[in-house]
Amino acid sequence: MTAVIQIKGLYKTYQKHFWMPRQTVLKGLNLEVEAGQIFGFLGPNGAGKTTTIKTLMGIIRPSAGRALLFGKDPWDIEPKQRIGFLPESPYFYDYLTGLEFLVFCGRLFNISSVVLKSRIQELLALVNLSYAADLQMRKYSKGMLQRIGLAQALINDPQLVVLDEPLTGLDPLGRKEFKDIILNLKARGKTVFFSSHILPDAEMVCDAVAIINKGKLLQVGNLADLLNARIKAIELNCRNIPEETAGKMKSRSLSSNTINGQWQFNLKAEADISGAIDLVKAAGGDIISVIPQKESLEEYFSREVAGDA
């Protein structure tokens, strides 16, 4: 697959005042994002997520290393025409209506009036803001501003959509709608790169993730592979077993529970699963399910960041 984003040995240092020592915000970041992925860029506050995204967008220059979009420098005009960007704290012209703002954004891309009119109506419907198209943005709520911000990020029908903390400030319904839009973008062949610290939501949509802390990349990879690599326990559900067999199963288990004759045993991850299944079958019991209990993304993230600390 083609790499849409490439980050190679990226460093960024700042000096707040000339008499103060320089602070290193990014420390040799290496990262690739393939076309068609939903990629989650995860880290605690102050980890360097926004600095990385600003470098990718050509807002700031790296101190060392390179960031490439579609194989080109972010400062080039050509890749900018193929991306949509929603910053973490966007500023909008308060006295413009949502419709006027999207017209302004569309004209920056030289979109023809006929195409722009149709696209704006589609985007307003997509982000559920058709009813507020003629309302000044100073009257928009935080959630509405996030929605109009997403609409402007999609005005040029970009191949790559970069979102910095897009779920912050949204209520549960708004977060679900945003996630649905992100999944729809993937279905249309777009690449989505977004930062977040709302990990359960990221787990639901991401194909791959990178975890960053204190400017260092801790982990990167396919999300399913990362979570499958650490099985906490194996849940075995069965029924119609005698008390003696239940006692033997309990001795193999981390915990157990029974409701209406159905047993649930949480076996150790390294347990002999085939042996446990044979034990149930030998007693005439029925196996209902065997389910590996994986780490959640939140558990995985917490373990990685705590280990780095």
Image (cartoon, rainbow, N blue to C red):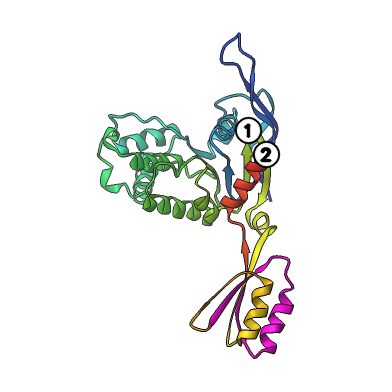
What secondary structure is marked by label 2?
Answer: helix
Q: Which residue is mark 1?
A: 214
* View extreme (bottom): residue: 284
- The segment highlighted magenta reads 262-290
| Residue position for label 2 | 308
Q: Quadrant of residue 140?
A: top left
Q: Is residue 135 above or below residue 200?
A: above
- Judge whether residue 278 is colored magenta: yes
Disc 2 residue type?
Asp
Residue drawn at 53 percent across, 39 percent down: 83
In the image, taking residue 246 as reference, residue 139 lies left or right, namely left
Please identify the quadrant where the C terminus is shown: top right
N-terminal label among 1 and 2? 1
Q: Residues within 10 Å of mark 1 (few under 14, many from 20)?
A: many
| Mark number displayed over residue 172 | none
Q: Are marks 1 and 2 in contact (CB under 8 Å)?
A: yes
Of residues 189 and 25, the one nearer the viewer is: 25
Q: Is residue 277 magenta?
A: yes
Position of 98 with respect to 260 (left or right) is left
